[in-house]
Amino acid sequence: MSKSNLKGRRVAVLATDGFEHSELTEPKRLLEKAGAEVTVIAPGDSAQIKGWTGGDWAGSVKVDLALGKATAGDFDALLLPGGVINPDKLRLKPEAIDFIRAFGDAGKPVAAICHGPWTLIDAGLVMGRKVTSWPSLRQDLENAGAQWHDREVVADGQLITSRKPGDIPAFAHALIEKLAA
């Protein structure tokens, strides 16, 4: 993938404390390598958010923009990393769910990995859609009307989902391809 393929493309990453470290940092790195501008967005006014890995806190990531100042119209796609804590916190923030829903309503790519699809349920984006996720979310997604598949990446229209950190290369590639199209 040449660096220029995503030149001019802007990707929002919505996360908060407790995101799965690799599920934010590695897709961000791969998107930037492909030429995209990636903006980390978080609720509140924190300068950084703390990651999680292997059952403990991991490194922090700089927040580029507060959620209250973010507009879906300024971005071409949305990336939702997992981790159990991160999406569970985001689900309780109406402004986060509204932000996610705005991408879906606009037909823009929304890519969610691991526990990230939890937020897609609250945003009303999974009814009748094919998805995947961390296995423990299967019942939640099916109860919300999704068709769950145990695959590395599931793409259904603008929705791209993956299961776990091991799926990151395929997950990032699917988002890059969608943005380059």
Image: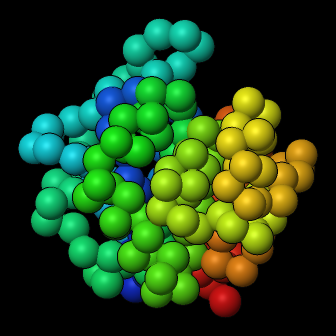
Total marks in image: 0
Q: Where is residue 96 shown, x and y percent of the image?
A: 32, 56
Residue 170 picture quarter: bottom right
Q: Where is residue 140 shown, x and y percent of the image?
A: 69, 42
Q: Residue at x 17, y 54 (%)?
A: 66
Q: Residue at x 14, y 44 (%)?
A: 44
- Seen from this angle, which residue lies furthest left? 45
| Residue nearer the viewer, 169 or 1 | 169
Q: Residue at x 21, y 67 (%)?
A: 70
Q: Quadrant of the N terminus?
A: bottom right
- Seen from this angle, which residue lies furthest top? 56
Q: Quadrant of the C terminus?
A: bottom right
Task: Mark yes or no: residue 171 visible.
Answer: no
Residue 102, compared with residue 94, is above or below; it is below
- Seen from this angle, which residue lies furthest front? 143
- Seen from this angle, which residue lies furthest right? 150
Question: How are the colours assigned in the image?
Answer: rainbow
Q: Residue at x 67, y 55 (%)?
A: 144
Residue 149, compared with residue 9, is above or below; it is above
Residue 50 picture quarter: top left
Q: Where is residue 131 shown, x and y percent of the image?
A: 76, 58
Residue 21, compared with residue 9, is above or below; it is above
Left or right: 44, with 113 as reference point: left
Left or right: 79, with 96 as reference point: right
| Residue nearer the viewer, 114 or 36 | 114
Task: Mark yes or no: residue 124 visible.
Answer: yes
| Residue nearer the viewer, 112 or 176 | 112
Residue 148, compared with residue 57, is above or below; it is below
